[in-house]
Image (cartoon, rainbow, N blue to C red):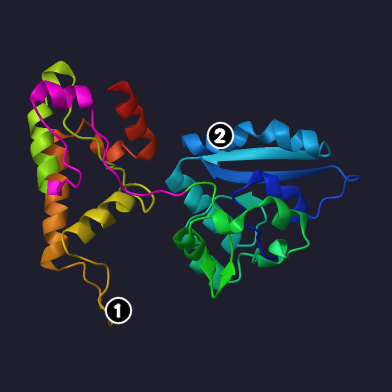
Amino acid sequence: MKRLSLLSLALCATSLGVSAQAATTITIATVNNPDMVTMQKLTPEFTKKYPDINVKWVVLPENELRQKVTLDVASNAGGFDVATVGTYEVPIWAKNGWLDPLNPMFNKDTAIAKSYGLTDVLEPVRKGLSYNGQLYALPFYAESSMTYYNKDLFKKAGLTMPAQPTWQQIEQFAAKIHNPAQGVYGICLRGLPGWGENMALFTTIVNTFGGRWYDQNWNAQLNTPAWKNAMTFYVNLLKKYGPPGATSNGFTQELHLAILSE
């Protein structure tokens, strides 16, 4: 039994082939970030349209969610009908036959094809959720690396954020506004270990320092000077100017800290 992976509640009833006569419960496994909270809030809209379908949510931190869902799918336990996955899982799981392709759902005569603008989804996101030309997940959101800064703190310190700051400049800015005695820390970065936690950020830092995971011949590049320089910079930046307990702070915790600083 293959697992079906979707990131949109509006598609659940059609994808599961639920009839209006049979009461059904669908179990959705998702990560505990604000975007998924938004998705949960849409549940009443879904159940209003499909009153015979009960929606059960399993909401977990990212590392725990990835571990639990991977175990469930790999062992064919069938604990989840719908799960939020990402570009890390899709090509691996699709190759293993753990996911069903969604392309048939978008034939021109289907209701989904008429209501869901698949071509409106950014092409890199669609490709990241595809394998061998087949789409295996639908994006609820996509992430990218960007820099946010507190304008009031910058103004107070006489700083100006350039349009394209370097990491070295970011470190200089962090040093200028860092004031733990006043409860102000120079920078917030993900420090919690995990592919979807600190590694999502750290990979972009490695790229900036000229590093990569593999070369063109698939030789690992983890022991190169670029990786060492990126790791040293990242660790020192967090130690010098980050908040206490950085290794416990992932996406959700950093977002909370950033909101408190405003």
The magenta region covers 142-167
Q: CA distance from mark 2 to mark 1?
A: 40 Å
Query: Residue at horizontal 70%, vertical 57%?
Result: 113
The numbered disc on residue 38 is: 2
Percent position (x, y) of residue 8? 62, 47
Q: Tell me if 74 is positioned left or right of 163 in this view.
A: right
Quick check: can you spot residue 206?
Answer: yes
Q: Any magenta on residue 244?
A: no
Q: Main secondary structure of the magenta part?
A: loop
Bin the neighbour count of mark 2 within 10 Å (Cα to Cα): few under 14, some 14-19, many 20 and up.
few
Q: Nearer the viewer, mark 2 or mark 1?
A: 2
Percent position (x, y) of residue 172? 8, 38
Q: Earlier in the sequence, mark 2 or mark 1?
A: 2
Quadrant of the image for the C terminus?
A: top left
- The image quarter containing residue 47 is top right
The numbered disc on residue 9 is: none
Query: Residue at horizontal 80%, vertical 40%?
Result: 50
Identify the amino acid type marked 2.
Thr
Secondary structure category for the residue under label 2: helix
Q: Tell me if 51 is positioned left or right of 94 in this view.
A: right
The numbered disc on residue 218 is: 1
Quadrant of the image for the N terminus?
A: bottom right
How many discs mark residues in the rendered view? Answer: 2
Query: Residue at horizontal 77%, vertical 59%?
Result: 110
Question: Is 28 located above or below residue 16 in the figure?
Answer: above
- Judge by depth and name the residue closer to the eye, 185 or 11: 11
Bin the neighbour count of mark 1 within 10 Å (Cα to Cα): few under 14, some 14-19, many 20 and up.
few
